[in-house]
Amino acid sequence: MHHQTLIQHLCPQDTKGPKFLQLYLFDTENELSNMLRAFDNPKKRDLDDNIIQFLMDIFTAHNEYVRTFKTAKEMADAMNMDSYGVRLFNNVPDRRYGPPALGTLGCIICGDDTSCNKNDIVVYSRPGSPQRVSKLHPSYMPLQYPLLFPYGEDGWSPRLKLYNNTRCNAKSLSYLVDSYTCIEEGHLDYITNNLEKLRSDYVRGLYNALFKGDRESRDVGKRVFLPTSFIGDPRYMYSHYQVALAICRVYGNPQFFIRFTCNVKWPEISRYMVSHDQNDTHSRGDIIARVFDMKVDAFIKFLKEDKTFDLYTIEFQKRGMPHCHMLLWVKDQHMIQDPTDIDRHIIAEFSDPVMDSLLYETVTTCMIHGPCGFLNQKAPCMKDGKCNKKYPKPFQQCTSFDKEGYVHYRRRASARHMMQSGVIIDNRYVVPYNRRLCSRFRAHINVEYRGWNMMIVTSPKSRPEKTDFVYAL
């Protein structure tokens, strides 16, 4: 679900002061105070008047949108026009890749002229319903993010081939997300306008035949069926779920479940941040995504060297780094037969800090859960006073299966431990891992034994971030 961006009329209402674009056109003698008043939140007292005035002077002198609307108002006032509007063109070829010249952005229209192109933006002087601004319009980005487009340069549009701009930290993240919603909206518009080519009319006819007479209010209106190729759609997910079940029919149940999480301290990411004099890795999601994609490819190649077969999903969660969920099939001769086989592949204890210092460092930095429980009641995993991952796990001398087939990994009460947040962390807090994978990729790689295909059903349900993921075979 994408939010809609609306543009207001040019004239403020009598009972309210100017807002948004109106701030540049009315009561210009009190422009600064009107601007500060528009920030109706407690943070407005922290705004610097000099900075606000400096930015407004820049927009007034150089932003072609502000100049266009100011010119339109001055012309309307000179001709005593009570009703007028400003039309922003949708398609002006000579301004695609640079700052626009005055007069190329739009024109003034008289009265309530409705002869404009349906893709143009028309802002009328008289109060009325706000107009929706299409994300495909080249004016959408400069109107939504004026600080990123101080001269009124075009934003993203279907005709734009390449555009490189500077970054503004957190504001750039909002801009990038909004830019992708523009691309997504373009894809959805294509599907909506080409239903016959995509044979969605056949699916809609089948749906109507099955549910004829069984209607709810939410079903009233035009129903658009997305194709199974549209990433994130339920039909897309279900089609891949069917593929996964088909794999189970041929190769049997998966043996292992692996969760591979990106590590922002990887040297590839650190080198880039240092070379570009940047400190906040979370502001460079593009670099993190590219490095993680290469790591996942290398990870899968490493697994396939052992002639294994896998199925995986990639998630981009809002609360942490991107990670990969993977189901792994192995050959018959390597399948788990008893608990001793599990101990050869999965460890839930600290490694030897002397004999394997590299693995010990990876385990202590990437494979520790919490602390939580009685050590930290405010941990994110705590719910109703208990850890929803059931940590700390009990000490166990050897690996065993319970009656339901679940595995309880070996966690011996040894002298190996670490200090974290002022408390002692022992084997009860170690997340199960594979020695070779953690040593090779230096990241959080949780490996669990799963000998049944129920994981294929439960794995999609574990995604709390809706459609923020990629599914691949």
Image (tube, rainbow, N blue to C red):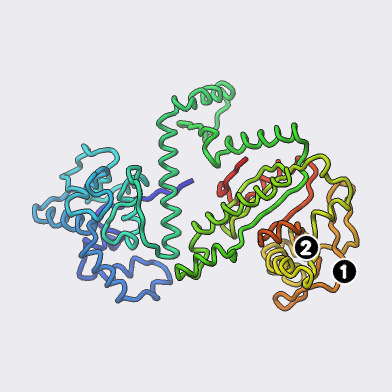
Label 2, label 1: how far apart the Cα atoms are = 15 Å
Residue at (87%, 45%) from the top-left corner?
337
Question: Which circle marks residue 413 in the picture?
Answer: 1
Q: Residue at image x 26%, y 54%?
A: 98
- Tell me the quarter of the picture where residue 59 sits: bottom left
Residue 356 image point, x, y percent: 76, 68
Q: Quadrant of the C terminus?
A: top right
**Neighbourhood count class around disc 2 (C-alpha, 10 Å): few under 14, some 14–19, many 20 upward:** some
- Secondary structure at numbered mark 1: loop
Q: Are marks 2 and 1 in contact (CB under 8 Å)?
A: no
Q: Amino acid at mark 1?
A: Ala
Apparent side of residue 160 relative to residue 184 in the rendered image (left or right): left
Q: Quadrant of residue 443?
A: bottom right
Residue displayed at 60% across by 54% down:
295
> Furthest-front residue in view?
305
Question: Residue 412: percent from the left, percent from the top?
Answer: 87, 65
Position in image of residue 328 (x %, y %): 72, 45
Q: Hey, which quadrant is residue 10 in on the image?
A: bottom left
Looking at the rendered structure, the secondary structure element under dot 2 is loop
Q: Nearer the viewer, residue 207 or 126?
A: 207
Q: Residue furthest left?
A: 79
Question: Does label 2 or label 1 sit earlier along the sequence?
Answer: 2
Q: Residue at x 12, y 54 (%)?
A: 75
Determine which residue is flagged by label 2. 391
Side of 219 where 139 appears, left or right: left
Vertical arrangement, residue 417 with respect to residue 160, above or below: below
Q: Is residue 123 left or right of residue 234?
A: left
Question: In front: 221, or 398?
Answer: 398
Q: Nearer the viewer, residue 1 or 137?
A: 137
Residue type at mark 2? Tyr
